[in-house]
Every structure is written in C-alpha cells, then in structure tokens.
Amino acid sequence: MGYAMSRLEIESELFDGGNTVHEASSSTRPGKPFPKVDDEISQLTNLRSGPNDRLHQLVPGKQQLPVSPVRMLAGREGNYSGKGRFSSADRCHMLSRYLPVNGPWLVDQTTSRAYVSQFSADGSLFVAGFQGSNIRIYNVDRGWKVQKNILAKSLRWTVTDTSLSPDQRYLVYTSMSPVVHIVNVGSSTTESLANITEIHEGLDFSSNDRRYSFGIFSVKFSTDGRELVAGSSDDSIYVYDLEANKLSLRIMAHTADVNTVTFADESGNLIYSGSDDNLCKVWDRRCFGAKDKPAGVLVGHLEGITFLDSRGDGRYFISNGKDQTIKLWDIRKMSSDTSCNLGYRNFEWDYRWMDYPPQARDLKHPSDGSVATYKGHSVLRTLIRCYFSPEYSTGQKYIYTGSHDSRVYIYDVVTGAQVAVLKHHTSPVRDCSWHPHYPVLVSSSWDGDVVKWEFPGKGEVPVLANERRVRRQYHD
C-alpha cells in the first residue's frame, strides 16, 4: 500500500555491454499500440534527455541499450565532451532514470480536501491549498516546516488555485468569487488570518457595470510579476494590472467555463486557455486589440479541458480532458475554424457524479489535431491537473498527472508508456508536483493527505495504511 507499483532500479557495470539494466517498469496502455509521436517533439525530447552519441561508441553494436551511470562517469573522466563535465542532456539522462516512486512519506494530514499542491520555481517552498479555507506554505529547505499558515478570506466552496509571484514574495489565491486575494509571503507572521493578523488585499476582477458574480478557476502571475491572468466561470479570461491596481482586460474567450490558463513561455506574450467547450485556444497579447479573437484554436478533446501545462518553449503544451485523456499539442498546427468542434456525444453524461461511459473510451474526434494522446488515468469529479516533468532533471521526458482513482500516473512523452503508477491515497488526487531539481514528487488528495515520493528515500519508514487511519482518528 505504501509503495509504488513500479520502481526504478539501476544495476550496471563498467563496459558490461549492458547485460541488465532495469528501468522503471513500462506497462503500455491497454488497447491499441501508441501511435508514433511527431518526429520533432521526439527529437527535442531526446536532445534534452539523451547522452552524447560518443558514449554509445564505447561499446560498438550496443547503441540501443541505455547508457549506464558508470559508463557515463567513465566518459566524463575521459573528457569525451571536451568540456570536462556533463552536458545538461547528460545530466537529464542520469537523473531521469531515478524516478520519485519510493515512499510515500507524510508531509501533512488534514480532515479537509486538498485542492492545490505546488513547488515554487526554485523548489524552496511548497504550497498546499485545502477546501477548509487553509493554505499552507512549507519551507522545503528547513525540513518542510510550515512557514505560513493562511486562513483564507471570503472563501466560496474551496481554494480553486494559488500562484506565487516570480520573486516568491507574494501569493494570490482564488475561489468561486470574482475577488482574488493577495498575501505577503515574506512577512514574519506565521499565522496569517485574513484582516486579523495580516491584510489579505482583495483584487476585484469584476467590472463596475456588471451586477452578477462568477468564480475563478485558474490564476497565474506574469513572468515579470506585474500582472495576473485568470480563467473564470463566466467564459472569460481576465488580465489584472497589479501596478495600476485595476482590471486591464476582459476577453470573452470561450462558450463555457474557462477552467485553466497558462503562459506559453517566459516572454509572457502568448497565453493558452482550456474550457468546458472542449477547445484549447492560443492568445497573442500583442494582438489583443482584435478583441475576443484568438490567434488559433486546437480541436481534439471530446469533453471539457481541466488543465493545461506549457513545455515553456512557446510551441508545445499538454491538456487534461474529461474524455479521460491527456493530449500533446503543437500550436503550429492550430486552426482558426471552430465549426468542426460540433458535439459528437450521443449520450447524457456529467463528470461530477457519473463514470465515463465505456462506449466513449475509444471514440476519437474526426478533426483531432493533437500530436499524441495518453490514456490510463481518470478525470472525474474535479479538475485533475497534469504537467511535464522538470526540464533540469528529466529534460521534460515525462508527463505526470493526478487521477480520480486515487493514484499518480507517469507517462513517457515519446512512447506513451506508463512508466510508474503511485498508489497511496484513498480519494481523488487533484494535484501533484515534481521538485524542479530533485527526484521528489508530492501528491495531495481529497483524503487530506499531502505526501512525498522520493528516489531513493532517506531511510524513514513510509506511511502505512494503519498509521494513516490512526492519525485521522486523532485529528477528528
């Protein structure tokens, strides 16, 4: 119960010809074979996570075998690269073989559903948001000590999203309300009670001429920290100018809830959005004068989109969909035509309380423009999130996602194989986060557990099922 179904074990000998190298177990998806991924994304992934070609030449005729860590070290000592050190791709080739699948170890446990869990960009902080109005910021470098315990203000339903500013001084949090609150993370106050021990300034995203309320599902800081972009339940994308302290732009972006928004790259010019209208859209901020008109549309999902994550290159991103799939997209293949997104469902279904119909699992959109599709996890009841694995340690070789079936799934981007399935939780895993530098992954669930998975672990005893039940009784 406490350990993952698949583990990574590396056993290699110097110039052994690759007799045995045990990688993370690679159970392929049920059903049809995974189609060949676009050659370009395959090549880009290999360039970021593959060793130098000269290392393969150390053992002629064995080019298809993984290059062992011992062989990598021998190559470095022999200065095969001419630089006297590993390249970034060499580093990723080494680290990406050590998946964070051991454990888990308990970070925190509450009686409230966990909705958000994210490492900061440098991995020094970790943020977890709960339905019971609490947001906790843990200092990872100080043994996961709680640095800030935030009691949210005017929360409606749950904390739907959080975002740290690029300098990690401020955190914003959202709920089913048009008001986004901002908290000073760097203050010395640990217990941050809204407008009691600290001011949680409210940023009103509703325009003055509107009389109705709406909720915000997704929020992100711009790369310069001067703006916020948000997706809402009134089918819109909002941009808030923090320096002017006012709403600067509203786009009627979709025909249904905008569940997710994200920036395409560090420039901040391109924004991706995903909606319950089944569409992913690309917005160019340099062309926002053409109001409500996207730069392009990407069609392929049969149900609504719950989350988007960018590869960071302004070209590729992934989306999690209520059709129980993750799709990989290349925005160069986007279209300006949305008429091909007509409804193909001939059955009644609502993901909030119904299982996905078996007859729909093998359906494919006739105009599907995605590069690849990944299946195996479950997207039900809540807006399940998915991500690329870190560039620094894995070269973004993997895609990982939470799941309604209480697990975390890790897929290989190129082959589509499930390289790991992490089992511990007893309720849906809505969010999870891979440390940007180390083989550590944290998952959070509606069961209230926030746990970390590592490779190889630090010798602590993992959380066991009976221990988890005892702690719950204590907290009740």
Image: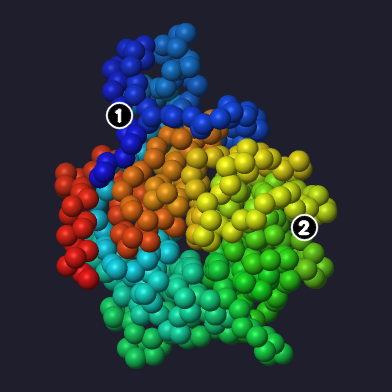
Q: How crowded is mark 2: few (under 14 residues within 10 Å), some or many (20 or more)?
A: some
- The scheme the figure's colours follow is rainbow
Q: Give the residue displayed 32% in from the left and 34% down from the top.
A: 7
User: x, y (%) of residue 126?
Assistant: 36, 62
Q: Give the residue displayed 29% in from the left and 71% down from the top.
A: 147
Q: Residue furthest top?
A: 61
Q: Give the residue displayed 45% in from the left and 80% down from the top.
A: 155
- The dot on residue 9 is 1
Q: Can residue 43 be seen in this view?
A: no
Of residue 412 and residue 381, the one placed in the foreground of this image is: 381
- The dot on residue 175 is none
| Residue identified by numbered label 2 | 295
* Three-letter residue code for mark 1: Glu
Q: Give the residue displayed 29% in from the left and 68% down from the top.
A: 111
Q: Is residue 92 above or below residue 172?
A: above
Q: Which residue lies furthest to the front in this view?
A: 347
